């Protein structure tokens, strides 16, 4: 039944099925899954300290676990104590000494306090990940000023608060910043005007900090996740046919995993990336190359259907 819905969705939106058995071709889906320690020395980040906003779950937690498996200790902050407690356990199981603090990235004083306490608990921060984010689906005309402001404050202002709070410690360690951006920053997606504005701001902030803070030895980069399975973002951009639609929009023909993103983030923390700064790196299976038309039509249909149910 699920596969039937996927086929119907693919036919409706004019895209080829992602299941190779449905089109009579063989698709190479990539190498078998490997642990990051199969590629990198598990001691490569020994003595390093990472600080991650929104680090209690999702992609941000996956980044923390990848760093922990390479020897780093990890500080995390977020709004929910329960998520942070669960994240702490996973990070400790991955080998890290962990600091956790409840802090809303919209509150600059709370972020400053969390960053200072992390430095005292674990040592000076050498890798800061600005990953806290918010999202919802809505036509631009239906987004309230409060809703627009909330996403910009969490994503963009929160990223600035974290980067600004980490500056002195990063200058001390000659460390680096990583911003978790989104494809909406450079490919317009319908019903995502608020997110696109915030993510575009993040990428521009990253470039400015790479330019200004390079003289202190601080690097800054953005990572741009594509359709990643099991994330809150995909759940909010979901629907019965979401997986089939996203796969069809992605040249590699599959959803990404949180580990796909985390592995690239961890690479950027290693000495192999010490001359990379000001870069925006897409981890999306090539999805940005196909545009957003299929997504726009599918979400529009879903919103129209929801209106019909409530009419």
Image (cartoon, rainbow, N blue to C red):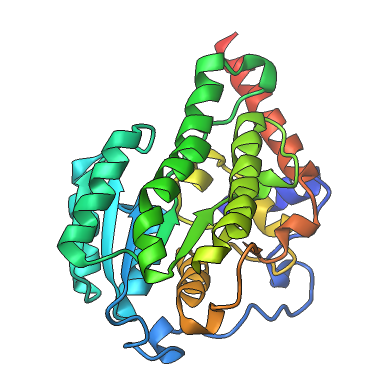
Relative side of 140 to 87, left or right: right
Determine the residue located farthest toward the right in the rendered image: 14
Residue ID at (65%, 47%): 204
Residue ID at (25%, 74%): 94
Relative side of 60 to 10, left or right: left
Above or below — where is 71 with respect to 80?
below
| Residue 130 visible from this viewpoint | yes
| Residue 227 visible from this viewpoint | no
Nearest the viewer among 147 and 120 is 120
Nearest the viewer among 9 and 40 is 40
Relative side of 57 to 240, left or right: left
Percent x, y of residue 259: 46, 69
Above or below — where is 227 with respect to 251?
above
Nearest the viewer among 90 and 161 is 161
- Quadrant of res 223: bottom right
Above or below — where is 14 with respect to 170?
above
């Amino acid at each position: 039944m699920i596969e039937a819905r996927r086929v119907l969705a693919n036919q409706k939106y004019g895209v080829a099925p992602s299941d190779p058995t449905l089109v009579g071709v063989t698709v190479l889906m990539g190498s078998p899954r490997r642990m990051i320690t199969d590629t990198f020395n598990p001691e490569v980040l020994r003595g390093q300290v990472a600080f991650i906003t929104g680090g209690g779950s999702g992609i941000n937690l996956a980044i923390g676990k990848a760093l922990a498996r390479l020897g780093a200790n990890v500080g995390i902050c977020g709004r929910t104590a329960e998520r942070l407690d669960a994240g702490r356990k996973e990070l400790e199981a991955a080998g890290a000494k962990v600091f956790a603090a409840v802090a809303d990235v919209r509150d600059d004083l709370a972020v400053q306090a969390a960053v200072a306490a992390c430095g005292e608990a674990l040592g000076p921060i050498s890798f800061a990940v600005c990953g806290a984010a918010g999202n919802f689906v809505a036509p631009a005309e239906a987004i309230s000023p409060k809703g627009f402001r909330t996403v910009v404050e969490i994503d963009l202002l929160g990223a600035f608060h974290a980067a600004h709070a980490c500056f002195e410690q990063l200058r001390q360690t000659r460390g680096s910043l990583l911003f978790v951006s989104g494809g909406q920053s450079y490919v317009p997606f319908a019903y995502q005007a608020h997110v696109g504005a915030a993510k575009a701001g993040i990428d521009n902030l990253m470039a400015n900090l790479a330019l200004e803070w390079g003289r202190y030895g601080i690097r800054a980069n953005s990572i741009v996740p594509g359709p990643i399975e099991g994330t809150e973002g995909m759940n909010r951009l979901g629907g019965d046919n979401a997986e089939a639609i996203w796969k069809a929009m992605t040249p590699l023909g599959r959803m990404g995993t949180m580990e796909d993103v985390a592995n690239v983030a961890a690479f950027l923390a290693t000495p192999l990336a010490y001359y990379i700064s000001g870069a925006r790196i897409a981890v999306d299976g090539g999805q940005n190359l196909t545009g957003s038309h299929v997504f726009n039509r599918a979400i529009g249909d879903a919103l129209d259907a929801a209106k019909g149910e409530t009419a």
